[in-house]
Image: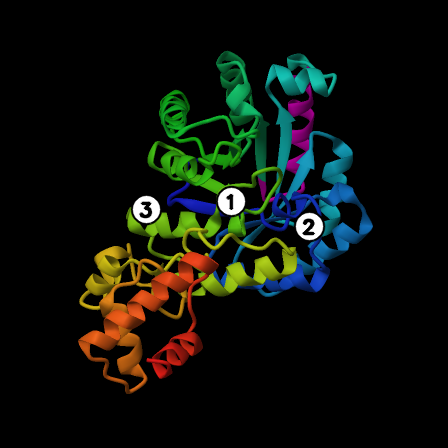
Amino acid sequence: MAATKKYIVDTTLRDGEQAPGVVFFDNEKLEIAAALDRLGIEELEIGTPAMGKEEIRNMAAIVASQHNFKTIAWCRATSSDLKAALETGVDAVNISFPVSHVLLAAMDRNTSWVMDQMKVLISDAKQHFSSVYMGAQDASRAERSFLNVFCAQALELGADRIRIADTVGVMNPISVKTLFEELSCDFSGADFEFHPHNDMGMATANALTALMSGASGVSCTVNGLGERAGNASLEELVVAMDRSLLSSRYDLSTINMLSKLVERYSGMSLPASKPIVGANAFAHESGIHTRCMLKDKLAYQPFDEALVGGSGSRFVIGKHSGKASIDRFFKEKGIALNAVQLMRIMAHIRSRTRKTKVALDGGHLLEAYQKL
């Protein structure tokens, strides 16, 4: 049956940890899971039980923790993976099948194997898990006719959801819109989840488009963490959903804390220009911008940073700074500059930053003032 509301599946602890060199310790996973719970994420894909006993123990600890989210294990299309998932106590399993010619050939499988194995695994899984999801891996490169056959049989056999995966990130918003409009028409009432990757830099846009075009939910990771160029970015998506009126139930004020937590534990530093949570996401240098923002915070921002748990807009003093931001800085220090002093300070800033390519801090500005 179709989901009654749009949902998010966070896969930071599974797909996010598959980013090269990233390992989360057990206590770190518990902290991340708790932070995702505070944000209000509905479902967490918490690991791959086939990795062994240690992974199973960690997943079981997350399941046993106090939380409101549904727990999911990612499984290959094998009975042994389902058996391992059963040890974790998860609510649901996502059973991933290759559906493109590329992956079928690479895995020495064919479409007949997919259809036969599906019959066995769905029947088995439905006896042990409250929800059974079927993953169409590399669906974006699959023959559309086979993808339809795959979906039809999965739903007929009782699968609760089908995950449409853009495994190597080749889709764009137009192709996503077309696909989910057609799937929604062909399989009315079915629950389709979209799993995008960011190889072409469009994962978050594709995720939002899927939700607006018939998908019930999407999967993503905190900070867009993941293999290669990563996944759809959770923090970008929840804010975009809020702005697009698709959802207003997430506690956006927890986003900055969650992002910094994952940044620290993953060891993957965020670029300063990262949307929503980057150091420069709410920083302003341009004279025109800062002058307008002193009158209205939203003049050159989509929203107040406090919405996502930030400390507020930041004015940077650099080559493009104007009189308004410089005058504001000194007034906050109890110093009133006259017109001549202000112009000399501006000239000093531009000369200095042209040489150093570095914005000036408060200490340097006060030092420059003392030398006037």
**Type of the residue with mark 3:** Leu
> How far, Cα to Cα, is label 1 from label 2?
16 Å
Q: Is residue 239 above or below residue 287?
A: above
Q: Are marks 3 and 2 in contact (CB under 8 Å)?
A: no
Q: CA distance from mark 1 to mark 3?
A: 16 Å
Q: x and y percent of residue 334 in the render? A: 28, 87
Please, what secondary structure does the residue beneath circle 2 have?
A: loop
Secondary structure beneath label 3: loop
Q: Amino acid at mark 1?
A: Cys
Question: What segment carries the magenta color?
Answer: 113-131
Q: Spot the residue most to the bottom.
A: 334
Q: Which of the 4 image quarters holds residue 50?
A: top right
Residue 134 versus residue 311 in the image, above or below: above
Instruction: Mark 2: give few (<14), some (14-19) or many (20+) Cα within 10 Å.
Output: some
Residue at x 41%, y 47% (from the top left corner): 237
Where residue 180 sits, quadrant-wise, is: top left
Check if residue 120 falls in the magenta segment. Answer: yes
Circle 3 Cα neighbour tier, 10 Å, few/some/many (<14 / 14–19 / ≥20): some
Q: Is residue 269 magenta?
A: no
Specify the label residue 220 is tagged with.
1
Q: Earlier in the sequence, mark 1 or mark 3?
A: 1
Compare marks 1 and 2 and give the one earlier in the sequence.
Answer: 2
Along the line of sight, the residue nearer the viewer: 124 or 348: 348
Vertically, is 223 above or below 121? below
Nearest to the eye among marks 1 and 3: give it. 1
Q: Earlier in the sequence, mark 3 or mark 2?
A: 2
Counting from the top left corner in percent of width and height, residue 316 is at 37, 65
Furthest residue toward right: 53
What residue is shown with label 3?
Answer: 246
Identify the residue at horizontal 75%, vertical 32% (top origin): 79
Q: In the rendered image, which residue does mark 2 sit on?
A: 22
Spatial CA distance of label 3 from label 2 is 32 Å
